[in-house]
Amino acid sequence: MASASYHISNLLEKMTSSDKDFRFMATNDLMTELQKDSIKLDDDSERKVVRMILKLLEDKNGEVQNLAVKCLGPLVSKVKEYQVETIVDTLCTNMLSDKEQLRDISSIGLKTVIGELPPASSGSALAASVCKKITGRLTSAIAKQEDVSVQLEALDIMADMLCRQGGLLVNFHPSILSCLLPQLTSPRLAVRKRTIMALGHLVMSCGNLVFIDLIEHLLTELGRNDNMSTTRTYIQCTAAISRQAGHRIGEYLEKIIPLVVKFCNVDDDELREYCIQAFESFVRRCPKEVYPHVPTVISICLRYLTYDPNYNFDDEDEDDNAMDAEQNDEDYQGSDDEYSDDDDMSWKVRRAAAKCLDAVVSTRHEMLPEFYRSVSPALVCRFKEREENVKADVFHAYLSLLKQTRPAQSWLADPDAMEQGDTPLTMLQSQVPMIVKALHKQLKEKSVKTRQCCFNMLTELVNVLPGALTQHIPVLIPGIIFSLNDKSSSSNLKIDALACLHVIMVTHPAHAFHAHVPALVPPVVACVGDPFYKITSEALLVTQQLVKVIRPLDNQSEGSDSFDPSPYINDLFTCTIRRLKAADIDQEVKERAISCMGQIICNLGDRLPNELPGTLLIFLERLKNEITRLTTVKALTLIAGSPLKIDLRPVLPDAVPILASFLRKNQRALKLCTLAALDILLRNYSSAVTPVMVDAVLAELPPLISESDMHVSQMALSFLSTLAVTHPSSLGQLSGGNILQQLIALVRSPLLQGGALAAMLDFYQALVATDTPGLGYMDLLRMLTGPVYSQSAALPHKQAYCSIAKCVAALTRACPNEGPAVVGQFIQVKSAASYALGSIAVGNLPEYLPFVLQEISSSKRQYLLLHSLKEIISSASVSGLKPYVESVWSLLLKHCECQEEGTRNVVAECLGKLTLIDPETLLPRLKGYLLSGSSYARSSVVTAVKFTISDQPQPIDPLLKNCIGDFLKTLEDPDLNVRRVALVTFNSAAHNKPSLIRELLDSVLPQLYNETKVRKELIREVEMGPFKHTVDDGLDLRKAAFECMYTLLDSCLDRLDIFTFLNHVEDGLKDHYDIKMLTFLMLARLSSLCPSAVLQRLDRLVEPLRATCTTKVKANSVKQEFEKQDELKRSAMRAVVALLTIPEAEKSPLMSEFQSQISSNQELAAIFDSIQRDSSSANMESMDTS
């Protein structure tokens, strides 16, 4: 401590030296000292240091002054409060001094101090007192209009302080406002501009009264409209307020918008530009309130998008004269002295209009058809805009339109949606020729920026409408080649052109390009040889696609006869092999060269007999290199699967052992790709794969077959199935080995399902067919069913019985003659038996189905036998079941009023799956049962509908679409359970096939929202001994309703009124535990989908979140209560983190208060930090995968 103060007093002494270098170095050392965390100053040193630094701010030497200002930052956080006040006082006084340099330095000093103060949310007293001190001084400096530069600095600092610490100055807001408003009429435009900035920051944190005063003032002044110049300023100010606090200005839009529309008609370009900018901020920031005015805004924008009073486009003969005009350009410039382009401000109006349209298109999803009718043609016509900046914005607006069209693809792939005529996609399709015509001219422009915009447009267009350009390829290819060959093209332009060409080639049929291959190959080959690695890597992608184009392997008939690839093979091979051999190139280029060469060998290998062996040896080298091995495995898989039967024998003896060794590497993608490669090598090169090689692979398999990674297990199983077909002799060693033990363990795992289960069944069938000694039908059966019968070892999970039963059924299907004996002994083990019985019956319907039906009617084991029936219905072929439909249907109906919910569910599933077999007759019957008197029957029928909906297109869809409305009428059913089931069915439809319910949403949504309310009459008290326990019968119903709301966010967002939706989310935030969890998820989803709407409601959403986070569990509660509360807190915090991703969220006073509450509470702060870390790492991952 003593040494530190001694050291500092030493420095202070040097600072008084007459030599400026001494002063400079001493200040620099002081700076270093102050930045150390350990430094502690006593009162005396503090006073001396502060006095010294303030003195140095007036130093004669500029560099010393600059350093002294920098010292203020660390100093503020190290000294006591009254010293900070001294610093601020002195700086404020110096700001009013006569010396300009001192004023500048002091204002930088004040900004530094404000920047160093702890943020408002931490609630420190220091920040508050400093800000209050500064505010008084600043308001008086701003109000005195003597010296403009002082005023400007003061305004700048005021804006800075309001932005950072606005919340602390609430008491000063009225005085700040009254000092700022007169400045809006200042004669200096710079003053007005900075005042507007300060007001923008003020409205983020000010109270309601101050806000109303400000808006009233603006409305009055705009109404008076004294002179143009101030009117412009007021319009700019309104736009700034809307940008910063859109959620508050919404209620005044009714008064503001007519005024702004009126000023649009005044002949003043600057004013028009500001008006349209104001519209843009309203559209983006007040989506709900601006809704009725959107058509007006669009029509104004469309009018001014073409507003170019000083320029005459002669549309008729534009094409013919274009060439002559270019030649006459030079002489033309000189003669036009009387009007110069510099005074022309109209381009700013056009730019504002394009940006405003961009905002409208991006925010009003539901108006897409209207945009394609009115906005799209207008934008396309303006691609010829002469002002570069405006043109870029026009393109950007059109890109936004295309991007809006893209998310809706799930329901557009739907056949019914296409029939409705004017979907956005069909309208876009009809406008493609017009778009291409407009772009065609632009692709030959001199300007690099314009051409880049064109390529982005084409890329997006093809992503939205794959295959749309087939007719137009002859027009576009020359434009792309022009940019690839043009010497003036920047590297970014070339990369964009190549990327665009790649996307077009991927999404269009090969024959469309055949005429252009001679023109395309030279520029692409030249780009592969380009010294800049990014161009090379894009060009290699294009080359890979080109190879597929010049010799498509999929349809030998139409493509390959007409087009001869031989002239181009050599060029493509030579440029790729050069990149493949080079060892010192960029990682991405290496990988793409390997993939590209793999494609060349796969599609053209038979034409390269001499080059092939050498190239394969390079692949072998690349396989041994850790960086390139994954890509090489993929390339080898491609080559091995080629229909040209490329000769891989020379490299297999080396390659297979290397591949086998990859199976024990800790890289999942590598394992999966290697298993796929080995599988295809076995299939196509079984003669060249020796038993020794197979043994090497088999040795690596046991660890891969486990429940910890089902996908890898599935690949390993399909490899074994292939092995059983190609090398049955190698399976002999399975009988005693580890692999079988692993398999049996996997069968007993409760996680086995889906693809892995299917692979397991295939393998058992393949294995039995090999007749390997020790692995026959009965041996395998014993292994599988052993644990079921031995009393000692109970299976851990019910699911295991089903998996075993499925395997047994698969074995029995493979050996039909063994079947009847097994069925006899299997009836003991209940649930598994029911499954196996079903599966075995599928193999032989006429024999077993009548038996099952008879058993159901007579026996006690209905539930299990119904399971067998479900199995039969879902896996049998349609034609086989047709004759039995009637008898099965009548049997099921007897059971659909059963008391047991489990049985009813199975019956419903059977009914639904049966309906799929003959929808025309059975669907109307189901509909008839809706009128049944029994609520059980009604719920069974509605559940049955759920099982007819799947995410693939099916013949039943058009019929369902017509009558699903009737099934959803059960949302008004008096019975709770029927309503709940109706919601579950609705959820399933919204999730799997939104097109079924999109048109019904207007009638369904009110009922859905109705079910989210808590009903007092459904809550009852149950006495449990001495305790009273409340039971809410409506909870499941509400839960189902909120689940539907969550699903609708993904599938039908454009049909929802987000604000009504948010009202119900808000109620859910105060509901029961399960529902809170759901609504927290919804909030997070909404923050990313429609941030502006959430922002408007932020204050109402923060309260319930805060309540959840601050709830305390009673000390004597059970452990589950504590866990539940923790889960809730974490979930609520996730929602808070998501809300904070909305840019303006933390500026809301309530939110910042909540944030300071979180940071001051240790437990909450810890949760908050961990979630923020998770979400940022998740973002990183999603970026990697994309």
Image (tube, helix red, strand yellow):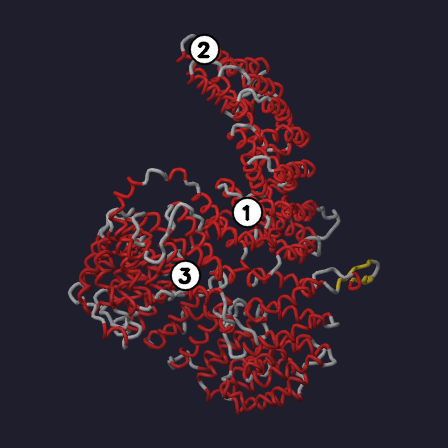
Vertical position of residue 561 compared to residue 843: above or below: above
Q: Mark 3: which amino acid?
A: Asn
User: What is the residue that sits farthest to the right in this orientation?
Assistant: 1026
In the rendered structure, which disc, 3 or 1, sits on the residue that comes first in sequence? 1
Which quadrant of the structure image shows residue 734? bottom left
Residue 751 in percent (x, y) is at 53, 66
In the rendered structure, which disc, 2 or 3, sits on the residue that comes first in sequence? 2
Q: Mark 1: which amino acid?
A: Phe
Q: Nearer the viewer, residue 249 or 576?
A: 249
Q: Nearer the viewer, residue 614 or 483?
A: 483
Q: Which residue is mark 2?
A: 14
Q: Measure how far apart labels 2 and 1 are at the Cα level.
A: 60 Å
Residue 907 visible here? yes
In the rendered structure, which disc, 2 or 1, sits on the residue that comes first in sequence? 2
Which quadrant of the structure image shows residue 1061? bottom right
- In the drawing, does residue 566 fall left or right of residue 149? left
The image's mark for residue 279 is 1
Residue 240 in percent (x, y) is at 56, 39
Which image quarter holds the C terminus?
Answer: bottom left
Mark 2, Cα crowd under 10 Å, few <14 / some 14-19 / many 20+, is some
Q: Mark 2: which amino acid?
A: Lys
Q: Nearer the viewer, residue 1134 or 396?
A: 396
The image's mark for residue 8 is none
Q: Residue at x 41, y 57 (%)?
A: 380
Q: Residue at x 64, y 44 (%)?
A: 248
Q: How many marks?
A: 3
Q: Which residue is mark 3?
A: 463
Mark 1, Cα crowd under 10 Å, few <14 / some 14-19 / many 20+, is many
Vertical position of residue 1096 compared to residue 755: above or below: above
